[in-house]
């Protein structure tokens, strides 16, 4: 009888899709000696370890068909909430192995170097908690390592986010960090540069930041808010979601920084993620809604800072993403002047005082790291943008308000160099031809004079000047001009 039931159960499992078939048989704990390789028959994610409720799992997540990420996946939505290797180099093949022998290691055969490792010694077992936290436990169930301490782009309910952590968007362009007294969103650029574009300062209405009690941290509360804390007692600040204290506390929640630079909170309901919170409400408030050198208007949508450039499917400057390519020489860029634009987050950009718009701009022209300057005559405030220009917003034109933007002559520097060489060659050829023509004219003129002298000696009268042939006339004329 038991054999018959087991056979029926196996037949039932075989009728399920590959992902669910693995999930149904996935363990809730792995111990030393564990090893797994990707299954080529599985199209989505291959569950290796699941929480007791099978809501979250540790899995091989297929990326682009041929690569994989080691990820904690929300099984019902098949979406990752944590990724061990955000830049997937592991291939979906039998050469890739996940093993656990005290340390959780993702490796590729023949490389000798782990693709990723938890860097833990003495681990005894691995588990995934109901809330999505992957943990490595040592003797006595001591937590040696957990994924909640190394977030990638997502925070889950009751997950602390400290000043030592960074939440980074999937495209790597934006990051969320906790600073001394605020939560901030930053645009990330090359050379280690960054610019704050959204800031939430702790209101400290019910609790105050106290020196000596440690840095502040953030947490997504299961009651529907993002809180800023210094201690567990009372939050310093609360960013309420739409479902603030309206859902059961066991609801699955997540907060993610997305590729457009916004942070959004969702909750899982009836088979879908429902939007619950957005830090930036207006599209024009996003750091790059219209792309590099884009102009965003709430009414008209996207356009280009340079009126001569038409906004298209690839934006205004699709190839201007080389942030470390500074602009120092004036012949490397042209200047676009506007009186009707502004930075949405101008208050978060450092400013200086200048007596005039010209003075403000002058300090930017020779500054290699300055990409734009905005000036207000009424306040004498000068904002020098020392990061690559992304989207700016349309504003009402004001007297005394000026904005100057360096627009790199994209690709023109090389073309100008080639054109310069060709121009020099052409000029040299033209000069050589002119000199030759002048010489030829002189020679013909001298020959003519000599001929005239001979004719005179023989009693013949020379002809008039107008009878000279066309080339001689040109030669004489050129000689006279010279």
Image (cartoon, helix red, strand yellow):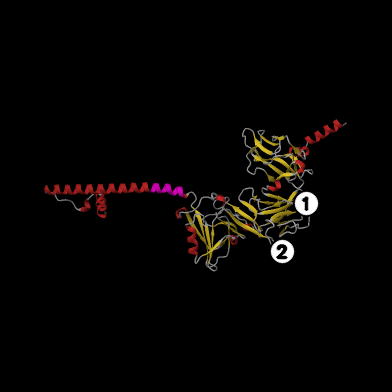
- Indicate whether 396 appears above or below 112: below
Image-quadrant location for residue 348: bottom right
- Indicate whether 4 appears above or below 132: above
Q: Position of residue 409 (x, y in %)?
A: 48, 52
Image-quadrant location for residue 286: bottom right
Query: Residue 260, which numbered label?
Result: none
Residue at left offset 62%, top offset 52%: 174
Along the line of sight, the residue nearer the viewer: 373 or 309:
373
**Mark 1 / mark 2, whichever is N-terminal:** 2
- Indicate whether 447 appears above or below 363: above
> Given this view, does label 1 or label 2 mark the residue nearer the observer?
2
Q: Which portion, as a residue range, is magenta?
A: 413-423
Along the line of sight, the residue nearer the viewer: 314 or 119:
119
Q: Which residue was labeled with disc 2?
A: 205
Residue at left offset 50%, top offset 63%: 360
Residue 421 belongs to magenta span: yes
Q: Main secondary structure of the magenta part?
A: helix
Q: Position of residue 21 (x, y in %)?
A: 76, 37
Q: Position of residue 9 (x, y in %)?
A: 82, 35
Query: Residue 251, which numbered label?
Result: 1
Residue 328 belongs to magenta span: no
Asked if the residues shown at circle 1 and circle 2 are in contact, with their CB atoms under 8 angstroms apart, the answer is no
Left or right: 10 as drawn, with respect to 430: right
Left or right: 250 as drawn, with respect to 183: right
The quadrant the C terminus occupies is bottom left
Along the line of sight, the residue nearer the viewer: 175 or 62:
175
Left or right: 331 as drawn, with respect to 399: left
User: Among all residues in the image, which is located at the extreme front?
Assistant: 212
Q: Say which element carries label 2.
A: loop
Q: Say which element carries label 1.
A: loop
């Amino acid at each position: 009888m038991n054999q018959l039931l087991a056979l029926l159960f196996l037949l039932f499992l075989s009728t399920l899709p590959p992902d669910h078939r693995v999930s149904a048989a996935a363990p809730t704990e792995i111990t030393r000696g564990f090893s797994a390789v990707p299954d080529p028959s599985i199209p989505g994610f291959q569950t290796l370890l699941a929480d007791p409720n099978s809501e979250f799992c540790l899995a091989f997540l297929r990326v682009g068909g041929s690569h994989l990420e080691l990820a904690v996946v929300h099984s019902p939505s098949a979406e990752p909430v944590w990724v061990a290797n955000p830049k997937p180099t592991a291939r979906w093949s039998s050469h890739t192995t996940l093993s656990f022998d005290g340390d959780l290691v993702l490796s590729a055969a023949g490389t000798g170097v782990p693709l990723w490792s938890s860097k833990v010694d003495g681990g005894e077992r691995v588990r995934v908690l109901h809330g999505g936290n992957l943990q490595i436990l040592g003797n006595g169930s001591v937590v040696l390592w957990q994924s909640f301490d190394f977030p990638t782009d997502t925070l889950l309910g009751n997950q602390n986010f400290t000043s030592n952590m960074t939440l980074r968007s999937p495209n790597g362009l934006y990051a969320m960090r906790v600073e001394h007294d605020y939560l901030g969103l930053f645009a990330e650029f090359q050379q280690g540069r960054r610019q704050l574009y959204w800031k939430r300062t702790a209101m400290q209405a019910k609790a105050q930041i106290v020196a000596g009690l440690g840095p502040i941290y953030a947490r997504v509360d299961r009651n529907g808010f993002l809180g800023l804390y210094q201690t567990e007692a009372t939050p310093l600040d609360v960013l309420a979601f739409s479902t603030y204290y309206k859902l059961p506390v066991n609801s699955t929640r997540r907060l993610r920084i997305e590729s457009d630079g916004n942070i959004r909170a969702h909750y899982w309901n009836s088979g879908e993620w429902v939007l619950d919170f957005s830090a930036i409400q207006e599209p024009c408030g996003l750091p790059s809604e219209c792309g590099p050198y884009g102009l965003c208007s709430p009414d008209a949508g996207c356009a280009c800072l340079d009126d001569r450039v038409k906004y298209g499917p690839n934006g205004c400057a699709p190839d201007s993403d080389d942030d470390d390519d500074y602009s120092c020489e004036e012949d490397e860029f042209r200047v676009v002047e506007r009186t009707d634009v502004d930075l949405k987050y101008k208050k978060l950009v450092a400013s200086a005082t200048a007596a005039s718009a010209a003075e403000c701009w002058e300090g930017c022209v020779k500054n290699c790291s300055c990409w734009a300057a905005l000036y207000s005559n009424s306040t004498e405030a000068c904002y020098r943008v020392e990061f690559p220009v992304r989207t700016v917003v349309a504003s009402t034109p004001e007297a005394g308000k000026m904005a100057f933007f360096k627009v790199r002559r994209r690709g023109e520097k090389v073309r100008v160099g080639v054109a310069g060489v060709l121009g020099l060659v052409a000029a040299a050829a033209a000069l050589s031809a002119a000199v030759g023509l002048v010489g030829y004219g002189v020679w013909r003129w001298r020959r003519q004079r000599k001929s005239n002298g001979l004719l005179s000696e023989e009693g013949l009268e020379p002809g008039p000047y107008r009878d000279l042939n066309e080339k001689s006339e040109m030669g004489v004329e050129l000689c006279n001009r010279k």
